[in-house]
Image (cartoon, rainbow, N blue to C red):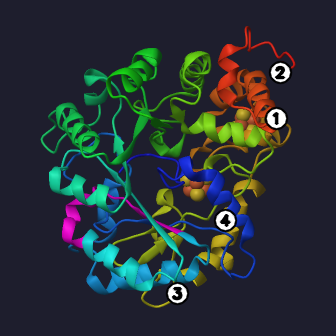
């Protein structure tokens, strides 16, 4: 499991449609759209990445087998479809390493989805994997059932192997690359999730060009690693600092906006463009409020978020209370609203608050310049990045409003200096 920001991985490339569907829902008692991060084998994983925040969750279920039962699977599939009354329902499978459940588990999941889907409902599946367990059979299944598969890869060999290790501490790069080759060979839709951390944050173009030119990734997510420091203060040594994260995003953006718009989809750029167009953010981290992506453990226990799987954030169990009711509960709504309610004054007065919204509450262990606690430890990076992209974003948004392609920005000289779009 990776320190990713919570919104379902792989779903962002479908955002315009999701947004329309969410807007059209008026009759559900549950939130207008919600996702569940399902963990059918809990924190169980065949790797032991140094920065993994989820491995320690195994302690929540001591002695348990960490495998979702057939009954819980059926309950989950049925309730998730019932609670999402949109014509498109997505299942997100994560871990730990979700392929440890074996292929038959997912064959059964797909059967159940067909059984419970309302006529006309489109069912989608995404699965986030470390890529090391894939073979032809898995890839054939993914292709046949149109799974969108996210693979975790932190850049070229040395950058990746710095923290992403096997159980014995050995490297994993070759096994991940072999998994990606299989996905490509079988025509599976896939994307890459790259954690930005102390070992790759300064290799900005090396990482991006590797993903673009050698891995030939079409969709990329960059997720900052922020581990709590001693006593919950600041951040631990593997973490990326705010300024380094900002420099990473700015350098990659400058390369992307000059030559890759429309060719490579980078999640944070895509989400930001939506906001510059006046749409709500589709990434929980940058939304005003959150709480629409709870995490579900192998036994049906539901928690407020992937990053808050702890007894204090347990909403209930889907075997006792319907998933839709748990997501719509006042407790979960309050969790989501706290994201905005607890913003420090420094954020409320910030010029890029409209797109940043203070970032994820799990990373707000910093202190603002005026001494108020609760500032995001990545603040400096967010502020630098979102300020830097303002002009090109305004150009691309204007192009889109004129029903033209944002890729036209690459033909506009000095696009960093805002000129009226010709
Ligand atoms: S706490 Fe909120 S913003 Fe952070 S990952 Fe969870 S849902 Fe997203
Ligand atoms: S850039 Fe910093 S001050 Fe501005 S909203 Fe984001 S976290 Fe808050």
Q: Inspect this view and state whether residue 309 appears.
A: yes
Q: Nearer the viewer, mark 1 or mark 3?
A: 1
Q: Are marks 2 and 3 in contact (CB under 8 Å)?
A: no
Q: Earlier in the sequence, mark 4 or mark 2?
A: 4
- Please tell me whether mark 4 or mark 2 is closer to you in this view: 2
User: CA separation, marks 1 and 2?
Assistant: 10 Å
CB contact under 8 Å: marks 4 and 1: no
**Lower position in the chain sequence, tag 2 or tag 3:** 3
User: Which quarter of the picture shows residue 244?
Assistant: top right
Mark 4 lies on a secondary structure that is helix
Nearer-N-terminus badge (4/1): 4
Q: Is residue 101 above or below residue 373?
A: below
Above or below, 143 against 35 in this view is: above
Check disc 3 and report the residue beneath it: 322
Residue highlighted by disc 2: 421
Q: Residue at the spot x=47%, y=18% of the render? A: 204
Residue in the picture at 53% in, 35% down? 265
User: What is the secondary structure assignment of the residue under circle 2?
Assistant: loop
> Disc 4 marks which residue?
21
Q: CA distance from mark 4 to mark 1?
A: 23 Å
Q: Mark 1 = which residue?
A: 402
């Amino acid at each position: 499991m990776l320190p990713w920001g919570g919104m379902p991985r792989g779903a962002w490339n479908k955002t315009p449609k999701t947004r329309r569907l969410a807007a059209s829902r008026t009759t559900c008692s549950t939130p207008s759209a919600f996702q569940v991060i399902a963990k059918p084998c809990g924190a169980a994983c065949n790797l032991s990445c140094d920065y993994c925040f989820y491995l320690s969750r195994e302690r929540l279920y001591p002695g348990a087998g960490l495998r979702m039962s057939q009954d819980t699977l059926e309950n989950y599939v049925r309730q998730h479809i019932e609670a999402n009354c949109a014509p498109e329902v997505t299942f997100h499978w994560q871990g730990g390493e979700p392929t440890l459940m074996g292929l038959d588990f997912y064959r059964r999941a797909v059967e159940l989805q067909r059984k419970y889907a309302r006529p006309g409902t489109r069912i989608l599946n995404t699965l986030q994997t470390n890529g090391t367990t894939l073979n032809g059979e898995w890839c054939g299944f993914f292709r046949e059932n149109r799974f969108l598969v996210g693979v975790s890869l932190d850049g070229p060999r040395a950058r990746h192997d710095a923290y992403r290790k096997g159980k014995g501490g050995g490297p994993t790069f070759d096994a991940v690359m072999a998994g990606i080759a299989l996905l490509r060979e079988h025509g599976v839709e896939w994307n890459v999730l790259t954690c930005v951390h102390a070992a790759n944050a300064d290799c900005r173009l090396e990482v991006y060009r590797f993903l673009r030119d050698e891995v030939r990734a079409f969709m990329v997510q960059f997720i900052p690693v922020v581990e709590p420091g001693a006593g919950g203060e600041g951040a631990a040594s593997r973490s990326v600092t705010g300024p380094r994260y900002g420099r990473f995003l700015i350098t990659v953006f400058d390369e992307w906006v000059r030559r890759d718009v429309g060719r490579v989809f980078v999640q944070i750029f895509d989400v930001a463009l939506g906001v510059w167009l006046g749409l709500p953010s589709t990434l929980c981290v940058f939304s005003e409020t959150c709480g629409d992506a709870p995490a579900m453990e192998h036994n049906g226990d539901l928690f407020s978020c992937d990053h808050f799987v702890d007894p204090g954030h347990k909403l209930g169990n889907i075997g006792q209370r319907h998933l839709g009711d748990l997501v719509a509960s006042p407790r979960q709504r309050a969790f989501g609203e706290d994201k905005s309610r607890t913003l420090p004054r420094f954020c409320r007065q910030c010029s890029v608050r409209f797109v940043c919204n203070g970032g994820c509450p799990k990373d707000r262990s910093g202190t603002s310049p005026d001494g108020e606690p609760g500032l995001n430890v990545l603040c400096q990076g967010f502020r630098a990045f979102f300020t830097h992209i303002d002009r090109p974003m305004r150009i691309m948004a204007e192009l889109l409003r004129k029903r033209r392609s944002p890729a036209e920005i690459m033909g506009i000289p000095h696009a960093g200096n805002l000129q009226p779009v010709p």
